[in-house]
Image (tube, rainbow, N blue to C red):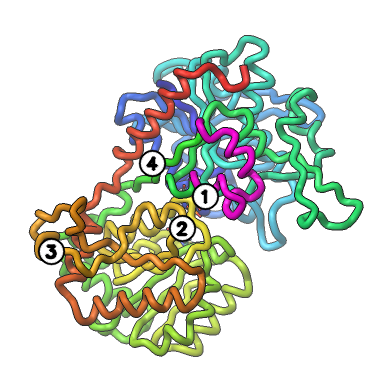
Amino acid sequence: MQIVFVSSEVAPWSKTGGLADVCGSLPQALVARGHRVMVIAPKYQNGSKSDVLYEGAFDTCVKAKLGCFGGEQEVGYFHQMKNGVDYVFVDHPSFHRKGGLYGDSYGVYGDNQFRFTLLSHAACEAPLQLPFAECGGYYGQDVVFVANDWHAGLVPTLVASKYRPHGVYKDARTICAIHNILHQGAEPSTTFPNLGVPNEWYGALEYQYPEHMRAHELDEGRVVNILKGAIATSDRVLTVSQGYAYEITTPEGGQGMEGLLLSRQNRLDGIANGIDMDEWNPEADADCAAAFTVTDMSGKLECKRALQKELGLPQRDDVPLMGFIGRLDWQKGPDLLQNALHDMMREDVQVVMLGSGLPELEDFMRWAESTYPDKFRGWVGFSVPMAHRITAGCDILLMPSRFEPCGLNQLYAMRYGTLPIAHATGGLKDTITAYNAFGDADKVLAGTADYNQGEGVGTGWLFKDMNADALMWAVRSACDVYRSEPKMWRAMQTQAMTQDLSWDNAATKWEKVFEWSKIDPPHCG
Ligand SMILES: Nc1ncnc2c1ncn2[C@@H]1O[C@H](COP(=O)(O)OP(=O)(O)O[C@H]2O[C@H](CO)[C@@H](O)[C@H](O)[C@H]2O)[C@@H](O)[C@H]1O
C-alpha cells in the first residue's frame, strides 16, 4: 500500500512530544513490511541550530498553489529519503520564525489555523504533484492518508469535499489518528471561509460548545472544529491504545467528541504505540555512561551513579532514584507530584524532574530543588540526551498523567529496566502490568514463567485515584520492593525488558486497519 502520514511534527526534524516519535518511526516499520510511505510535515526554520537538520532535504522545485484564506497560497516541497521513507517538508514563510513549533513565550501563534490549513492542503496535493523521479514516481491517487491530530485534520474533510466529488482520490482512504483529543483546532465559526472547504460542508466542521464553556451570555459557542471534521469525514478513526479508544467515547474522556465517536464506534480502533528500538537501546545509547543488557545490568548502576554525579545528588546505590520526563501541563499531572512532594521527601528517595511548560510548575521545580537540595533536582527545558540519561539512570519513572492516550516514556523506561509508577489510565493501563506479589520471580528470571497463568511479577505500579495518597501508596510499595526484595525487583526488570515493545507488532495492526479501510466504501462517497 501507499501510505501518506501528515503531521505537524516528525522526529528528528521537529519534536515537542510523542507525536514526532510516532511519525518518525512507525513509517519505517511500515516500509520494512513492504509498503511505500511518505511523511509530510512543515519545514520549520527558527534560526537555531536545529535548522541544519533539514540540510539533507533537497528542494523538489515543485510549487503548489493552494486555495484557502481568500486566495492562492504558494508552498514548496523539500524531500529527503531516509530508511526507505519519503520525508516531505512543506516550505512556506509562516513556518519560518523564532520560537517553538506552535507558539513562543507570548503564547500560541495567532495564525496556527492558517499554518496548518496550508499543511493539510499541501499534503493533499503532494501525492499528485511530487514526481519522485528517481524513487518510484508519483504516488498518485491510490493512497491511504493518515491525518495525525487536528493539525492535519483538514485532510479527510478536503478529500471528501474537494477531491472525491470531482472523481479524484476515489480509491484513496483517510484515517484520522488521534494522539491527543484535548487539542481540536477550534476557531470562531466566522473563520470557516478561510479553510478552503466547500460551503455545503460547513456542518461537518461546525461544533457548538455546551453552555458552561461559553464566555458570556451572548456567546453562542459556535466554532469550526477541525478535529471534529476529521472524525466526521474520515474513513476510519484510530487512536494510540485500546484503553484510550474507549475513554474518548465517554463524557470524561471525549472532550465533547464522545457522541460523534460513539456514532463511529464500528470504525474506531486503538493500537498501542511501539518504540524506536535503535534510538532507545540500552545496549548502545550514546547519551548514557554505560551500556547494559537484561542479563548484565552492571552498566545500569553506572548510569545511575553518573546521573547522580551530573545532577550533584549524593552518589548512593541504595536509594531509589525516581524520574519524571514530560510537558509540565494538566495532562501529565506534575501538580500531583507537587502535592505529594513533602510526603515523598520524607521517604529515603531521590527525585529528578525534566520538563518545561506552565511557568508556575517550572517555578515549583526550582523551589523544590532549593528546598530539598539533597533529594530533588529539577531540569527546566527540553533535552533529548537528558531524557535518555534519566530513563537509563533512574530506578523508577513517575507518570502521574491525568489522561494518557498511549505514553511513550513508560515504554522507553521499561526497555531500560526502569519500572514505571503510573496513573491507571488510557495507554498506561494497557502497557504496564501491575506488580504481582504472588508472581514467580524465579520462573521470570529463568524465562519460563507463564504470564497467562499469573506467574508474571509485573512491570510497574498503577494507582487508580488521581490524588497524592494513591501516588504515595504506589511509591512506598515500589520502594519496599526495591529495598527488601532485590530478586523480585530484578524479575520485574526482566519482565519489563523482555517484552516486545518494537513497532513491528503495532505496524502489523496498523496494516490491518489500512486493509479494513480499503474493504469498506468511502465513508463520505
Ligand atoms: N523536557 C523534555 N525533554 C526531552 N524530551 C522530552 C521532554 N518532555 C517530553 N519529552 C519527550 O517527548 C515524548 C513524549 O511522548 P509521550 O508519548 O509521553 O507524550 P505526548 O503527550 O507528547 O504525546 C501524545 O502522543 C503520543 C504519541 O501517540 C502518545 O503516546 C501520548 O499519550 C500523547 O499524549 C517522549 O519522547 C519524551 O521523552
Q: Is residue 469 left or right of residue 34?
A: right
Q: CA distance from mark 4 to mark 2?
A: 24 Å
The residue lying at 28 percent from left, 61 percent from top is 459
Q: Which tag is nearer the camera, tag 4 or tag 1?
A: 1
Q: Quadrant of residue 258?
A: top right
The residue to which callout 4 is attached is: 25
Q: Which stretch is magenta?
A: 245-267
Of callouts 1 and 3, which one flags the residue occurring earlier in the amino acid sequence?
Answer: 1
Q: Which tag is nearer the camera, tag 1 or tag 3?
A: 1
The residue to which callout 3 is attached is: 296
The residue to which callout 2 is attached is: 425
Q: Closest to the observer: 50 or 259?
A: 259
Element on which disc 1 rests: helix
Q: Quadrant of residue 240?
A: top left
Tell me if mark 2 has few (under 14), some (14-19) or many (20+) residues whose alpha carbon lies within 10 angstroms of its own.
Answer: many
| Circle on res. 247 | 1
Residues under numbered marks 2 and 1 in contact, where contact means CB atoms less than 8 Å apart: yes
Q: Position of residue 156 (x, y in %)?
A: 60, 28
Element on which disc 3 rests: loop
The kind of residue tagged 2 is: Thr
Of callouts 2 and 3, which one flags the residue occurring earlier in the amino acid sequence?
Answer: 3
The kind of residue tagged 1 is: Glu
